[in-house]
Image (tube, rainbow, N blue to C red):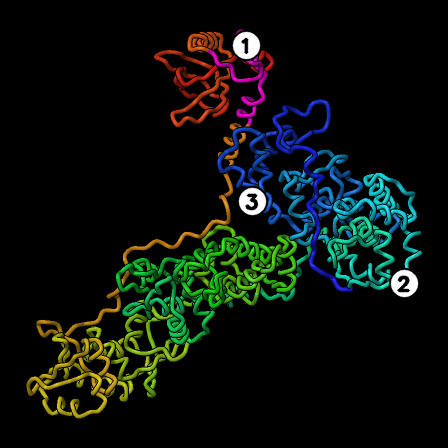
Amino acid sequence: MGTGRLTGRRDQEATTVPEASTAGGTAGGAPRSLAEALRARDDAALAALLHARPDLLSPVPGDVTQLATRAGTRASVVRALERLDRFALQTAEALAVAPDPCTYPVLESLLTGEEGTTGQDNGARAELPRALATLRDQALVWGDDDRLRLVRTARELLAPSAQRPSPTGLGPTVAEATSGMSPTRVQEIVSAAGLPGTHDPVSAVSALTGLFTDPERMSALLDEAPAEAHQVLGRLVWGPPYGEVTPNPTAPVRWLRDRGLLLPASARTVVLPREVALHLRGGLAHRDTAPVAPPVPAHREHRPQLVDANAAGQALAALSTVEELVKSWEHAGPLVLRAGGLAVRDLKRAAATLDTTEPAAAFWIELAYAAGLLASDGEADERYAPTPAFDDWCELPPPERWSVIAAAWLPATRTAGLVGEQDGKGRTLSTLGPELDRSAAPEVRRRVLELLAALPEGASPDPDALLDRLAWERPVRGASDLRARLAHWTLTEAEVLGVTGRGALSGPGRALLEHRDPAPLLAPLLPEPVDHVLLQADLTAVAPGPLRRPLGDTLAVLADVESKGGATVYRFTPGSVRRALDAGHAAADLHAFLKEHSRTPVPQPLAYLIDDVARRHGHLRVGAASSYVRCDDDAMLGEILADKRSAGLSLRRLAPTVLAAQAEPAALLEGLRAMGYAPAAESLTGDVLVARADARRTPARSAPVPVPDGPPVPDDTLLGAAVRAIRAGDLAATAVRKEPASPSVVPGELPRTSAAETLATVQAAALTGSAVWIGYVNADGAASQRVIAPVRVEGGFVTGYDHTADEVRTYALHRITGVAELAEDQV
């Protein structure tokens, strides 16, 4: 017998009591609806509900009834359930399969096991009040302990159904499973179970339910079952509760089916009734409960000084990597794809430039983008390039530069770890693409750092224990465990960024988490920038530390970085020297620069290299015709024409010292350089063009705004105003009005008073300082009910304190549909 897909029927018990009701007050007994339960709360409890579920504030509910209705909508309930910890969610799941209403002892037995059985009270009994209080505070459960009710929408989401397996693994009740069964078949099951026959199907189902919920009679019935039947039940007891059967089932299956221990769900499917499963489970709704959050112990302990030193080294490397990446896009940044984002080949090129992997390169690109250091230029031929903010960032001291990128990383919703995966439509997600935002990323990132901060200083956790804790705090609902992946990426990114060191939270990282400036803590940990290098005879220079800004910028143009680490090694090549000459530096300037900043003599091979490249630099001149090459040495031009490598440039001689080409000047320059020459570009006037490193910048661009994870959490001011508005609206909706004097007015409805009656009533209220209830239609035609205390009536307008809006307002008298005085006990 195999298990099959869950089927089942919607639990109908939750529809017996309306959750949103306009009945006022709870005097004389327990609340009869969710609205009454919310109405009985004090202002602090209502504010706590709105703080925990900010989606209920958009827009502010008009009264408590609207608040209760909105709290029961599917989208809001789903969002609230997703933010419960595992035990609070298990408590809600137990209520979803419990009778409605449910008593506290019954709920407790579902989570700890029936008394006298092998239950699992692993702290569930002590933690249940906390979990239940959480559900009550978030308006997912209402009612006293003797009549607990899960809101209808939550019951529908968590209870078993034909389309969705139950989180508890329980199936439908006996009444639900037999609702479509013929009365004759029900009678056969009742008789086979040894119960007295009855002609009433409802009584028969009730008798069968009573049997399955009676531990003694149920144990006696199961004692008669064949041994193989117990094995069949054992495969279904913890779910899924459905199993497929053949047209001719085995004898054990027939024995169970005949006695209702298995009920038919379809022609070839049977289901284990909920009451039977609970008896076999010992009354437990879950196989394993998790009432207490799993601890996150210290896995390794390091000296805090060692952690901070390691993190500072990573921070310095991060600054160097970001700067190198953005500078590599200064002249010819990568093109923006038509659908947005970076092409795969450009990501590979960036990874090669940074000497790292493609996922790591994607992270650095997204980090620079989140910090506002690079963006698209918005041109017709759209490319990515540095922003003006990059120049300002480069001028900051290293600790402040790190603060900028770290502060951009923590709240960013851009998720580089998704690069290369596919979206729901089968499209590959690209770096800087529009589909990389995940609103849960900032919350997970901050929570991971908070768990690290809770450990002793210098201690690092076991990553698996940390992931278990996060999974308990927000249980995964669905197939994709995005939160676990976000947590794993956070640990990796925090380490390479320098927020952590050796897996432990660093001092600057702790300051970042606590909204303090980390720069003062990072500054003493970073080495002081040096103003010199060590030149070596093998055409290399060693920087014994981070270089000061002018020296570092010039050396980055004059030489190529060969290796990084505690000391950076630069290599001088003909191409790097030519790059410096193209930037406007003369050979004499380069000699003087090296002599000034080197602690060792300038090696003779390096001096020869600079002079040799300088001697040939600019001997050829390239300009724009389509393009041309001119040179005073016609023999050199003849050599170029004879070279087979120049065939792709389509060169032809115009004069003894001039060659014309079909290629663009930039392509011609690159082609000649690839052939081993050192041409220089010239302007229309014949002057040598100097290539500046900061030639290309995007227009001013702000950093991307993180995608919010739902409505923002309201502040105390907004919460106070919202609670006052809800209370005032509730007063208007539930206030007791005096009976109108006109017999044509129906009691309890909005009186349709005449203009004269309306004017007289509000004038009298203004004189006596009393409040009145009015119906008002605004300029858009929207009708509303208001409780106002008139202060002044003149010029066709009434000005007064509006209890509903908690402010003084003015209303046009001709838009007031009717007015009634409030009963004295409501004033």
Vertical placement of residue 336 versus 701, above or below: below
Q: Secondary structure at mark 1?
A: loop
10 Å crowding of disc 2: few (<14), some (14-19), many (20+): few
Q: Which residue is mark 2?
A: 227
Quadrant location of the N terminus in the rendered image: bottom right
The tag earlier along the polypeptide, 3 or 2, is: 3
Q: Seen from this angle, which residue lies furthest left?
A: 655
The tag earlier along the polypeptide, 1 or 3, is: 3
Q: Closer to the camera, 181 or 30?
A: 181
Residue 642 percent coordinates (x, y): 17, 92
Tell me how far mark 1 sits from mark 2, CA to CA: 77 Å
User: Along the horizontal axis of the image, is 780 left or right of 666?
Assistant: right
Does the magenta segment cover residue 581?
A: no
Vertical placement of residue 680 versus 224, above or below: below
- Please tell me the numbered disc located at residue 75: 3
Q: Are marks 3 and 2 in contact (CB under 8 Å)?
A: no
Vertical placement of residue 185 versus 807, above or below: below
- Please tell me the numbered disc located at residue 385: none
The tag earlier along the polypeptide, 1 or 2, is: 2
Q: Label 2 sits on what residue type?
A: Ala
Magenta highlight range? 727-753
Residue 362 seen by the camera: yes
Does the magenta segment cover residue 752?
A: yes
